[in-house]
Amino acid sequence: AHLDQIEAVDGTINAFLYVDAERALEQAAIIDHRIAGGEQLGPLAGVPLALKDILAYRGAPTTCGSKILEGWIPPYDATVTKRLLDADIVILGKTNLDEFAMGSSTENSAYGPTRNPWDTSRIPGGSGGGSAAALAAFEAPLAIGTDTGGSIRQPASVTGTVGVKPTYGGTSRYGVVAMASSLDQPGPCARNVLDAALLHQVIAGHDPYDSTSIDAPVPPVVEAARSGDVSGMKIGVVKELGGEGYAPGVEQRFREGLEILAAQGAEIVEVSCPHFTYALGAYYLIMPSEVSSNLAKFDAMRFGLRVGDDGSRSAEQVMALTREAGFGAEVKRRIMIGTYALSSGYYDAYYGSAQKVRTLISRDFAGAFEQADVLVSPSTPVTAFPLGEKVDDPLAMYMNDLCTIPSNLAGNASASFPVGLAPEDGLPVGFQVMAPPLADDRLYRVGAALE
Ligand code: GLN
């Protein structure tokens, strides 16, 4: 049924870069066969899933939305992919994204933008717009995203779906093509809170292949999603995330979300995180610095595309031609900013200062979590904007990540849950919940109470 739906709508939505119907049906047939044989199956046996095209899936092309990886087929599975397969999930294909997950609208994909199923003239968010749109268009019931500065939560917000960025180190980055390693985190995407928790449970947990993976039990996310009990919970509204620049309908639905929680016995308090104002600035130095280092491996020799290798050119010339042709404008912009920020003479002023701000933001969180069990805000300042509206204005595009970025800088758990439609445009609004590291279960408790 999901393959049929993809066939019917994906010509318009463009959520998928790659669908392998034969492989999916074969996986499903094997599961049927094992059921018939009375075998014990994995916890999500037979449930179809859409995988963001930045996670390795053995034998399937992995492009990261970039021309530079054209033709590259990973010979191995990411740990998350392996855990999906071990749970007997059926992988339908790979979903569209901004090139190397850099963007907030999926318009930076080298393979064309994804469209928002609520209004196909609008963006589905980014970078994981393909995964979110696949859910909203009923092309898949589950999806995987990755979140470096909001790429799971912002698309969830503008498509009316659920997206969770686990605690940094809670899910493995092994086999996830790196954007900014100290920020990247794969996580679950779904249409409802319990589905997201069931997926979270399957993919999370310690992985010796990822040196930043936390060796601790997975928080009780499924129990929390089933309970939804928020009585006595202290909910901290972050003063700095709201007000000017936020759409009236976004603020209205956010306030109604607070009322729903209060009606179930939660206590609403206001908290202040004064350094959040500088989060965007710090992120757009730290992230490109890591990008400039991580993307150095695309050298025309090791992976994918190779341009101009006709025997007349040096390795350096081939590398330059390949990068020129293979990387899009936003990727080049970030490599240049990062190289500059890390260069000797500027390192302390830019990268060093940004790291200090990062520490101040973590301290803001620590202080706020002494006053509240979770922190909340709108997930994004505005609803889905029209395709093309912000493509020529990188700063306007970056502003979308205002609410989501602090959690990446601090490494805590964070999620976006749908809270209805903005009255002025009828488009989905997301409610962001942030929890301390390894308290991911609190996200689901609040999400379930809102549902
Ligand atoms: N939109 C943000 C960026 O462009 C976040 C991206 C992400 O989380 N991968 O960097």
Image (cartoon, helix red, strand yellow):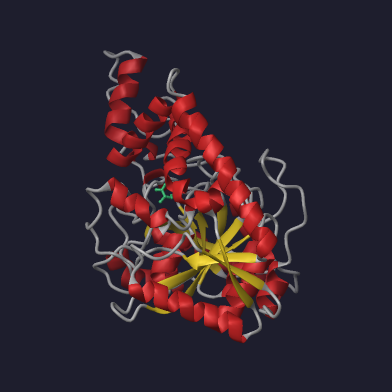
Q: Residue 318 lies in what quarter of the image?
A: top left
Q: Is residue 312 above or below residue 42?
A: above
- x%, y% of residue 331? 35, 38
Above or below, 332 against 369 in this view is above
Q: In this orientation, which residue lies closer to the viewer: 76 or 141?
A: 141
- The total of numbered circles placed on residues is 0
- Relative side of 223 to 320, left or right: right
Please say if 73 is above or below 403: above
Residue 48 screen position, x and y as percent: 53, 68
Q: Quadrant of residue 197?
A: bottom right
Q: Which residue is drawn at 35% across and 63% down?
A: 244
- Rendered position, 283 above or below 86: above
Task: Assign the C terminus to one quadrant of the image.
Answer: bottom right
Kindly identify the residue that appears in the image at 51 percent across and 30 percent down.
Answer: 352
Q: Is residue 299 visible?
A: no
Residue 33 shown left or right of residue 2 in the figure: right
Viewport quadrant of the N terminus: bottom left
